[in-house]
Amino acid sequence: VDVEDNAEEHTVLLAGDASEQVWLLVDTGAWDKLAGSQWATQAAMVLQKHGQNVTVNALAKPLRVKGVGQSAPTITESVTVPGMLETRDSMSFDDCPVVPDSDTPALLGMKTMERLHCVLDARTGQRLMHLGEDIQVIPGPNTKTLQMYASKSGHLVLPIARYGQTSTSQH
């Protein structure tokens, strides 16, 4: 998969070559998941074309985030984005806070990775993570191994929906 290094990459939603793809940016520096309104809108358009619906919900109380854009925006909505991983397993990007009027990509942050018991390893191109020389990672029968991709800018991205020629079936 070639993640193009252009303006589209910053929304982590790429389309071209008869394919439409929705990506998450794997961000170990992000506290938790977060997405800009432009990403949420574009993801909804792609998914709706393929019979999937993005759900928008009001947050119980407004959320302020720092380190996103020039000011600390107030977030009042979240989205749930359905996805299909390359393993053909479904995965929803649930209750993701949406930064209004923002081109921030969808960030898969540390709290979500912790909830998913995520391990990153850079040895084999799958980019999982262990520390120490004697660690053994042996996937169990309920473990999913997901392929992430490095963009030309070096960011790790995870496809959650891929349609068209480069896709596995979504249904």
Image: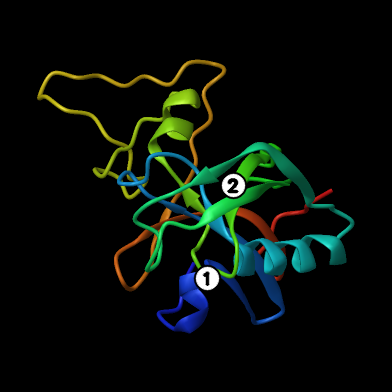
Which comes sooner in the sequence, label 2 or label 1?
2
- At 31% from the left and 21% from the top, the residue drawn is 137
Where residue 98 sits in the image (x, y, percent)?
60, 54
Residue 87 location, quadrant: top right
Report if the CB atoms under discs 2 and 1 are less than 8 Å apart.
no
Q: Residue 103 carries which label?
A: 1
**Furthest-right residue in this view:** 51
- Spatial separation of the CA atoms under disc 2 and disc 1: 13 Å
Going 72% across and 79% down the picture, which residue do you hit?
Answer: 18
Which one is in front, 93 or 79?
79
Q: Is residue 168 visible?
A: yes
On the image, numbered disc 2 is attached to which residue? Answer: 97
Q: For the residue marked with disc 1, what is the amino acid?
A: Asp
Image location of residue 154, percent across then percent down: 29, 65
Say above or below: 150 vs 26.
Answer: below
Q: Where is residue 35 in the image (x, y as percent from the top left)?
A: 55, 56
Kind of element beneath mark 2 = strand
Q: How crowded is mark 1: few (under 14 residues within 10 Å), some or many (20 or more)?
A: some
- Who is closer to the viewer here, 30 or 91? 30
